[in-house]
Amino acid sequence: MSRLLIKHGRVVDPSQRIDAGLNVLVVDGKVARLAERIEDRDAEVLDATGLVVAPGFIDPHVHLREPGFEYKETIASGAAAAVAGGFAAVCCMPNTRPANDNAAVTEFIRSRAADTGLARVYPVGAVSKNLEGGELAEMGEMARAGAVAFSDDGKPVHNGYLMRRALEYARLFDAPVIDHCEDPTLVAGGVMHEGAVSTRLGLRGIPAVSEEVAVARDVALAQLTGGSLHVAHISTRGGLERVREAKGSGAAVTCEATPHHLALTDEAVADSSYDTDTKMSPPLRSAEHVEALIRGVLDGTVDCFATDHAPHHADEKALEFDLAPFGVVGLETAVPVTYDLMVRRHKLPLRLFVALWSTNAARLLRLPGGTLKVGSPADITLLDLDARATVNPDRFRSLSRNTPFAGQRLRGWPAATVVGGRVVWKRDRK
Amino acid sequence: MSVKPASRLRGKDLVGIDPLTAGEIQLILDTAEQMREIAERPIKKVPALRGKTVVNLFMEASTRTRFSFEVAEKRLSADSLNFAASASSVSKGETLLDTALNLEAMQPDFIVLRHQYAGAPHQLARILKSSVVNAGDGAHEHPTQALLDALTIRLKRGTLEGQVVTIVGDLQHSRVVRSNVLLLSRMGAEVRVAGPPSLIPPGMEAMGCRVFHHVEEAIAGADVVMMLRIQLERQGRMNFPTVREYYDFFALTPERLKLARKDCLVMHPGPMNRGVEIDSRVADGPHSVILEQVTNGVAVRMAVLYLLAGGHGEPASD
């Protein structure tokens, strides 16, 4: 019997409305007891003095690139980056090569992740065969093999008929459909947010309405079908407004926001002088959208945070802004970026911060974690809210370095990550 | 109020008008006026850049700008190397970064870059030791064009301040309009821009201009009317209907020109589409200073290279 005792920490568990100094005893990978005093001579002790003990953080949106793009990231390197960023679990998008559009690929990802033994990896299956937006992929087989949701992420599901059927069919497995909401005919080859900055920089703009019209369509389809819709990486005021209305109508609509869309504006493209690490899809938006997104987090319209961790090789990013691929890594910066911005600056209560990184994602994706209830899997994230450090991409576990946060000094870093009762990562204390 | 010229340029590069102060613009224009005189001499050459190497790296087709830079370089006694390539072949071959690093390994003093994508000169300027001169980047900036336009106006009018300058055309895809709006507004001119609403990007006003949809309103009382080339090759069929309709609504015709001031200057950065954005009677008429712009282009490029090389005041005659 393996036993782990996490002592002297401040336990913050929104699922049980707990915020108190408690010890946590883990036995055989499950939470066994929460109490003010626990003595257990046989247990390995993890001293959490001065630390927050939270249900394991979950990143519902990452790209692990394996199979097919192992030079950008592998399941092993991505899982290592996840735990070093404080994440006990990640959901990986299906835009690999071959795409995760059938059970064999789903099983491959699951077994690779199990061999790695770090973060839990929950595959997201494709909505359409080869992500082509034509025919439905075998969602049932993938669900049986462990897919927790369905998405053509990277691309929107442009065909309204297909999206309708996907939302209907996914009800069979009680799985959400995650859509990258963008109307490609309005994106029209744009490379950054359309506005005064894109005009000044002479870059082709992506209008905010390209997201809003896609969210509006998806919301209407969710209302029609009764299916669960999760809007990936929402970035615009209008898109968020459509989600807010949908929630008011009782539709099963949720959404996520990324650290970079919350912390940066389109001015970052100008300030960095066309640094391609400020290029992602959807693009960094103007201040009015960023402010709306922050309000959406504070008022609960945004259900969870997600990194949209999108590793790209340095050679691919060292191109003209128009030619470089979209995407930034996020796993190893997400927690301090969101803590510093949302909790310290915008006074988001800590229990909501934990819910946004853990409990809520578990609920909307029907995952076993997100709680420290007795009997649940012992996935635990420890946070050092006073730790200050500077983002140094050279120290990333991820194979890629494409972050817009390099050199930023941030406060509130993960201290240790526990998965299934095993301490899989601990921060070096300097 | 006239702007006092700066004593030197602060940066090692000229990537755009945006980073320049009014004083630096004034310095370049003053220097360019002196450079014009060199072209009047029997021997059109000074030794100012003797022993300096300039690479003209043109990743996008250009005749006029490349020739203009070459003439400027030769008149200053620099050694010019021309490198022409297509940026679209980038997937097959070397990246821009590698090309630039390879060229820099031969220790040039300047890299003059024309590129089809916005920001390419900025990306190179960050990593290269040589001075990078932007000869046009995508739909972003074309600083030497705006400088030569300003020099042309200044020579004709004596000043830029208070001049009403109207720029008409495809504002969305034009680097010329961006550099001109930035420069002219910074120097105290009143800048108006006009074009089909479907070709006006958002937030242009913030760059320092007033935006018009109807060309007649924009031209009324103007001191200068600058027509932009309609880049048919960059248009889908959804931005405006036809060239015929464009001429109808936006072309500079003798009738429209009557709305401007009597002694209005007509400018065009070239190459012109006669009968599309400009009527030949106007292009070749008494108001046109289009060929003087070309002449001034050489002087401005000489001034830019000379100043970036560390020169100030008047170039030594011999």
Image (cartoon, coloured by chain):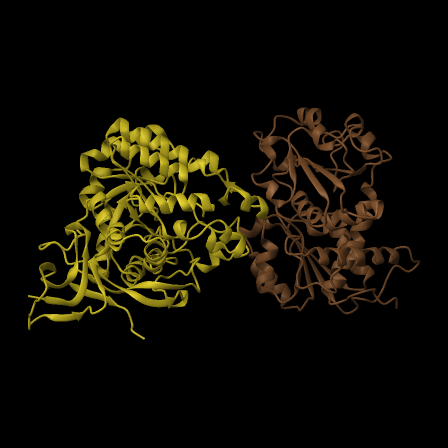
Chain colours: A yellow, B brown
| Most foreground residue, A176 or A45 | A45
Could you tell me residue A124's position as x and y percent? 27, 45
Residue positioned 76% across, 58% down in the render = B4
Figure quadrant of residue B223 = top right
The quarter of the rendered structure image containing the C terminus of chain A is bottom left
Left or right: where A126 falls relative to A319 = left
Q: Is residue A133 something that shows in the picture?
A: no
The quarter of the rendered structure image containing the N terminus of chain A is bottom left
Q: Is residue A261 something that shows in the picture?
A: yes
Give the number of callouts: 0
Left or right: where B133 falls relative to A407 = right
Could you tell me residue B276's position as x and y percent? 72, 30
Left or right: where B295 falls relative to B54 = right
The image shows residue A296, relative to residue A389, as above or below, that is: above
| Most foreground residue, B196 or A67 | B196
Residue sitting farthest toward the bottom: A430
The image shows residue A426, relative to residue B184, as above or below, that is: below
The image shows residue A220, relative to residue B49, as above or below, that is: above
Could you tell me residue A107's position as x and y percent? 22, 49
Left or right: where B73 falls relative to A209 = right
| Most foreground residue, A146 or A305 | A305
The image shows residue A76, relative to residue B138, as above or below, that is: below
Residue sitting farthest toward the front: B1
Could you tell me residue A286's position as x and y percent? 47, 45
